[in-house]
Image: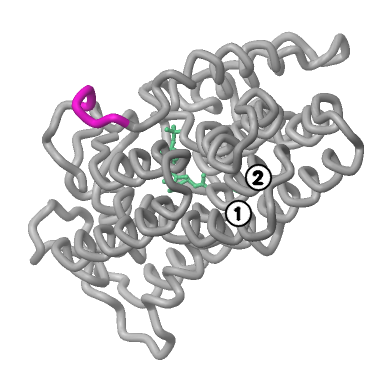
């Protein structure tokens, strides 16, 4: 739950995997002789920026809990982080969330320029699939991995969720033209839900299952695909990921209200400023905290079914609830 505990006390379950992920990401920053230096630099700037590496870690954890070798899952880990990095670059653009800070650094369009940022995103998006095609052993497996990742990143999942999120923000602006310009972390200052006919909570959930959840789900599925997991194992991972992906988003919304920008590495309070549809806005801070706890408890139950090999998944579920950044 956004807590005041120092980061070091929360075991995310994959600190030992992180150096291997970083090394693989660095090695993947070779974009070919035709790639202009400035573009290559911008792609590397985004991909290697200090992120939590949750999605690549999930790929490797899934491989491990399905009885496979984490190294076999590395191409999936790199590919999913490339998609994530592209989505962050584009999300930060002036036409979308218009952010100047990401992962504690200037966003790509601030550090370089807008056109370079768009192209760096395009380059990483495409490179993710090239990477899978080059590094997954066995063409059937490579095609399965590419199919899963392209679906998750596509118009009905990540891109569609982002589009609906932007539309919801537009609607909120139209419905509440006099919405307060800023809000703090007091319950009474949270945005008032606008009057509307559609079930707002379900709509919010649908957005986040696509915008945030799709990459969490496909990360786990890629790990399973790359080590030939059974249908039963994939089913269990799918249930775990549905819960953990949504919990991550609920906590993200909470952090936007409660965390400091310096801790989070990006600007805070933006959701409230924009009158965005958020969990604290709809459920209140306590309701949102309870929702996150219930989702994480559900993910824990799924992870327990993997026995000892699900240990990292259990630790990660706790981390999602406890994280401060
Ligand atoms: C542009 C197609 C397109 C999609 C954008 C990434 C995204 C979708 C939106 C970012 C806005 C946002 C705050 C989403 C909430 C969840 C999320 C993706 C948070 C960032 O992920 P972290 O916290 O980031 O894992 P790091 O930097 O640690 O990798």
Task: Give yes or no for contact between labels 2 and 1 (Cβ–Cβ under 8 Å).
Answer: yes
In this rendering, the answer to whether 94 lies above or below 230 is above
Magenta stretch contains residue 29: no
The CA span between labels 2 and 1 is 8 Å
Label 2, residues with CA under 10 Å away: few <14, some 14-19, many ≥20: many
Asked whether residue 88 is in view, the answer is no
Which residue sits at x=73%, y=55%? 151
Magenta stretch contains residue 9: yes
The first of marks 2 and 1 along the sequence is 2
Residue 248 % position (x, y)? 37, 50
Residue 112 % position (x, y)? 57, 19
Name the image quarter holding the C terminus: top left
Residue 231 % position (x, y)? 68, 59
Asked whether residue 155 is in view, the answer is yes
Which residue sits at x=17%, y=46%? 258
Q: Quadrant of residue 314?
A: top left
Q: Which residue is mark 1?
A: 233
Magenta-drawn segment: 7-11
Which sits in the foreground, 173 or 233?
Answer: 233
Question: Residue reaching furthest bottom?
Answer: 197
Which residue sits at x=50%, y=60%? 166
Q: Secondary structure at mark 1?
A: helix
Q: How is the image coloured?
A: one colour
In this rendering, the answer to whether 79 lies above or below 144 is above
Q: Is 123 positioned to the left or the right of 104 in the image? A: right
Q: Which residue is mark 2?
A: 224
Label 1, residues with CA under 10 Å away: few <14, some 14-19, many ≥20: some
| Secondary structure mostly seen in the magenta stretch | helix
Q: Quadrant of residue 318?
A: top left
């Amino acid at each position: 739950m956004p807590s005041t505990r120092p980061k070091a006390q929360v075991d995310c379950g994959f600190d030992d995997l992180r150096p291997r992920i970083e090394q693989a990401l660095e090695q993947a920053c070779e974009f070919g002789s035709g790639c202009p230096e400035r573009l290559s630099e911008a792609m590397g700037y985004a991909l290697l920026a200090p992120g939590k590496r949750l999605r690549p870690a999930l790929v490797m954890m899934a491989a491990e809990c399905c009885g496979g070798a984490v190294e076999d899952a590395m191409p999936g880990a790199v590919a999913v982080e490339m998609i994530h990095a592209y989505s962050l670059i584009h999300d930060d653009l002036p036409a979308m969330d218009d952010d100047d800070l990401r992962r504690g650094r200037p966003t790509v369009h601030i550090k370089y320029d807008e056109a370079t940022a768009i192209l760096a995103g395009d380059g990483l998006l495409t490179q993710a699939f090239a990477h899978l095609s080059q590094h997954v052993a066995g063409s059937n497996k490579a095609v399965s991995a590419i199919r899963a990742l392209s679906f998750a990143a596509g118009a009905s999942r990540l891109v569609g969720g982002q589009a609906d999120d932007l539309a919801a923000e537009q609607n909120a602006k139209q419905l509440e033209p006099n919405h307060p310009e800023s809000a703090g972390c007091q319950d009474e200052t949270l945005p008032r839900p606008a009057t509307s006919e559609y079930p707002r909570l379900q709509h919010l959930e649908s957005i986040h299952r696509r915008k945030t959840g799709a990459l969490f789900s496909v990360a786990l599925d890629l790990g399973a695909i790359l080590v030939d997991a059974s249908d039963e194992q994939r089913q269990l991972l799918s249930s775990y990921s549905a819960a953990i992906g949504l919990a991550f988003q609920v906590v993200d919304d909470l952090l936007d209200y409660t965390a400091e920008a310096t801790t989070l590495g990006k600007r805070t309070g933006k959701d409230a400023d924009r009158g965005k549809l958020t969990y604290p806005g709809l459920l209140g801070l306590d309701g949102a905290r309870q929702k996150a706890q219930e989702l994480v408890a559900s993910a824990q139950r799924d992870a327990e079914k993997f026995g000892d090999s699900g240990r990292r998944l259990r630790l990660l579920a706790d981390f999602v609830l406890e994280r401060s950044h």
